[in-house]
Image (cartoon, rainbow, N blue to C red):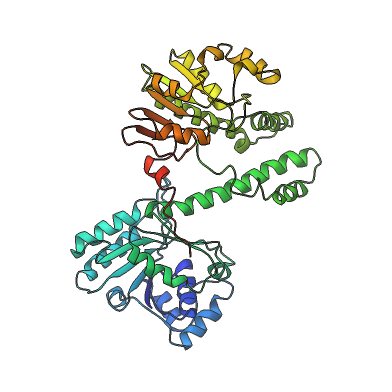
Amino acid sequence: MNISIFGLGYVGCVSLGCLAQNGHQVVGVDVNKTKVDQINDGRATIVEKDIDAIIATQHLLGRIRATTDFREAIFNTDLSIIAVGTPTTAQGHLNLTYILNVAEHFGNVLREKEGFHVVALRSTVMPGTCEKIAAMIEERSGKTRNVDFAVVSNPEFLREGTAVYDYYHPPLTLIGTESERAAAVVRSLYDELPAEVIVAETKTAEIMKYVNNTYHALKISFANEVGNICSSLGIDSHEVMDIFCKDKQLNISKYYFKPGFAYGGSCLPKDLKGLQTLAHDLYLQVPVINSIHRTNEIQMQRAIAVLMRHSHRNIGFLGIGFKAGTDDLRNSPAVELAETLLGKGFSLKIYDRNVHTSKLTGTNKEYIDQHIPHLSRLMVQDAQELTEWSDVLVVCTKEAEFVHVLSETSNKVVLDLVRIQADVDASNQYIGINWSQDATDSPAQLTFR
């Protein structure tokens, strides 16, 4: 394929060399003539393992060149990759000047160019940037997006020092677009790579780099705080984290990574508080660890804020345990939510087949007697009784039974705290705590190779 790459910095130079090595004809475009001359002399514009040899070899084979003439580059290629810088302003926003300048060029040139042209944005940008670029190109070119051209998000996940290796061994390849035609074009770039290709909505792809890198920063900060606690106690922090990383079922896994309602149960709140107290007693500052419970409180407040709009209506809880398939009520976020609503004068009823107040014994009975001793009068024994009485249904646990209940329910407000993924009737007003109803119908627009 004939490809043009706008920006010959870190990402642009690596992409230029690797795409050429995969057999494509690639032209680099940059306003900096020094960089253009370097490529045309067969020299890389960056210092990075293996890229010098790749650029030199592909230059000799005639697969790469560079130019300052953006017009010629766009006219003679089918796919353009934007890899220009997006520096951060003093206020923390992105400076999109370089990207928007490139977008103007595409608008002007595509007005005269025939054929379908794909613009793939590799630069790190905020969600909505591809939409903004596409609108600019449409306005200037008179062409129609996803018909005459497409702007696609194709974020890179390259680490400095191992960028060439990372290019050829990615964990995945992500393409954000609503155009199947554009997705097919970009997908073909990665036929040589062993990773799965995921096609998602454009905004989903745009936010992924921020989510990934913020999580990486969180991991480093968390490990450092654990390390500070361990070293104060004379414990080998590296041994602790090595053991931590051996657990691939829970610690290093997809578990606990589903956005939703607050956490609860008998272990997480207690042990988090224990580690916070230990750090406090050691006179250590652990702001990451100390902020975890605050984030949990915010999720609770988020649900309360939604329900406050329905304070004059009957609220029915589907589930009250701390998670599905259990009668454990200790530190259940649903119990805390119920307590709060009752304190604010809400009319409330609860259905949970796992919890029968007449059969509760031991710890659960003590918890009920202490926190919501009037639970027995709030509980109903039949789901239909609850739905008929309720104006608003709050799904608190992910029971399979509730999928059927919701599919048979109409003309209700449904607040889903667990992403039950039920077939909710269109007559209901569906509110997901962190998602829309469309998201429950189609969890993600994923395409795997």
Where residue 239 appears, x then y in whole percent? Answer: 77, 49
- Residue 301 image point, x, y percent: 47, 26
Residue at (73%, 28%) from the top-left corner? 281
Q: Is residue 119 above or below residue 339?
A: below
Residue 276 or residue 411, whichever sits in front: 411
Residue at 79% over, 46% down: 236
Residue toward you, 118 or 412: 412
User: Does residue 220 appear to the left or right of 136 in the view shown?
Assistant: right
The extreme right residue here reads 234
Residue 17 visible to an observer of this rendering: yes
Residue at x-position 67% and y-position 15%: 366
Query: Can residue 29 be seen from the camera position used here?
Result: no
Considering the image in quadrants, where does the N terminus appear? bottom left
Q: How many marks?
A: 0
Is residue 87 depicted above or below 46 in this figure? above
State the image coordinates of residue 237 (x, y, percent, origin top left): 75, 46
Measuring from the top left, give residue 374's x and y in whole percent. 55, 11
Considering every residue shown, the one lying at the far left of the view is 142
Residue 318, placed above or below residue 78: above
Q: Is residue 43 left or right of residue 271?
A: left
In this view of the protein, which residue sits in the foreground, 143 or 5? 143
Residue at x-position 48% and y-position 51%: 210
